[in-house]
Amino acid sequence: MSDTVSVWAERSARVEWASSIRPKKQVWLWEDRIPVSTASALAGRGGTGKTTYALHMIAQLSRGTLPGQYYGDPRPSLIWSGEDAWSTVIVPRAIAAGADLTKVGRLYIASEEAGQTSEAIPKLPLDTDRMCQAISDTGAVLVLLDPIASTMTGDLHREADVRQAVDALARVADKTGAVMMFVRHFGKGGGNASDKMSGSHAFRDAVRSLFLFAEDGDRVVVTQDKGNYAAKGDASFAFRLDSVSVPTDDGTAEVARVVDLGVSDTSVSDVINRTTDSGEHDDIAEWLHAFLANNAVKANEVYQAAHAAGYTVDQAKRAKKRLGIAAVRPVNPGPWFWQLPDDQGAESTEGAGSTEDTQESCSLLPVRSEAQERPEIGAGSTEQVSCSLHPSTALTPAPPTPLTTRRQELRGRRTIRFRGREVPRCLVCAKPVTAGQGDTHLGCLSKQETA
């Protein structure tokens, strides 16, 4: 029984006691993965087979072979696609997946104006009642919107705008019992896979199940990143895309078909961070190498410069590890500095055998014994300069290594890569010059003039 608590205009707040609500068991579209009457999402970078996998599920529903509520009971699904053509892409893929085409429907909105009927893109929440009617008329149990961004109004990065659209889908799902599934893309770079869905975090928060996709060699890894009502189980699985020939009226079409590979020990997070490490290697490693080429720099300044150059702190740290960059603290307590490794293998000696190469092998941050100041070295002194490298008995410098050669090349360069483009390299500090100041920062020029 409902009690009226307060009334304002035509709206009222009411209460329904739990004792009047009959408990029901959770019903699954896909056993232990996707509950019925909910919103669901597939997310990943372009080309990872999100839509093809959705068609794989739709084909199983059409044959009654998807484990869950409709196993043995073939059911229809509806698709709205803003990116793929039905005749050349979706229908051939559905055929390759073995779908019953009489149970795969093309959803669209008919718009009538001045006596003319045309197709319109579904808009959320404007067309939710029309979607409910289409689901009711066809008995569809799954509706795929690909991509959801095309159906939205407002800003994809504003939580309120995203919630308005996704909550509208959730209401359609709750009213009809169908699963409302949409496709979203990943942002660039690595990091936490849960945070990679482009746009507002509300895309993830508002759905009840979320599947992340990432290409891993010749297969695709899928991780169920969110399953509010699912029991603990195998979070990740994999599939591969095989090319198959589908006959058409004007020849044979080659399309992709999903081949399930079962449980995967590798998650999408593992894949995107491994891929990011490889893909970003040349770009950020070159930037960091050039940034530290002339002197050691405070770690916090490296992070700030990396951010300004379009890189994350984690990317900078991974590049630091790959390049063997040392983190040193000349004074304790005091700030940490990053400096390139000295790979010459020989130490500079005062007086004899000293060359530019061997002098350069000394640490940019001198190491002092027991924090005591070293007395000034006179002209006749035989004391060696303190260096972070072990002394070498050979006075002739070692031949340049590839890393040394690379450092010398970078020092000679007049430009530096910054956010994907070449910009002037400051003649004083060797950092990017990005504000139209010529080839030297105005601040560096000022310091040089007053020195």
Image (cartoon, grey):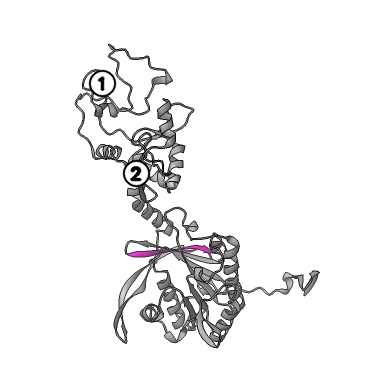
Find out whether residue 424 is within the magenta segment: no
The count of marks equals: 2
Q: Secondary structure at mark 2?
A: strand
Residue, disc 1: 349
Residue depicted at x 43% and y 44%? 435
Mark 2 or 1: the one toward you: 2
Expressed as whole percent of the image width and height from the top left, the position of residue 413 reads 29, 41
Dot label at residue 416: 2
Q: Residues within 10 Å of mark 2 (few under 14, many from 20)?
A: many
Residue 402 rendering spot, x and y as whole percentages: 24, 40
- The amino acid type found where label 1 is placed reads Thr
Residues packed near mark 1 inside 10 Å, few (<14), some (14 to 19) or many (20 plus): some
Does 193 appear above or below 347?
Answer: below
Q: Is residue 189 visible?
A: yes
14 to 131, vertically: above or below: above
User: Left of 249 or right of it: where is 59?
Assistant: right
Q: Position of residue 431 (x, y in %)?
A: 38, 39
| Left or right for 147, reference 292 | right
Q: Quadrant of the N terminus?
A: bottom right
Report the span colored magenta.
218-234
Q: Nearer the viewer, residue 217 or 414?
A: 414
Q: Position of residue 206 (x, y in %)?
A: 57, 65
- Residue in view at x 45 percent, y 37 percent: 301
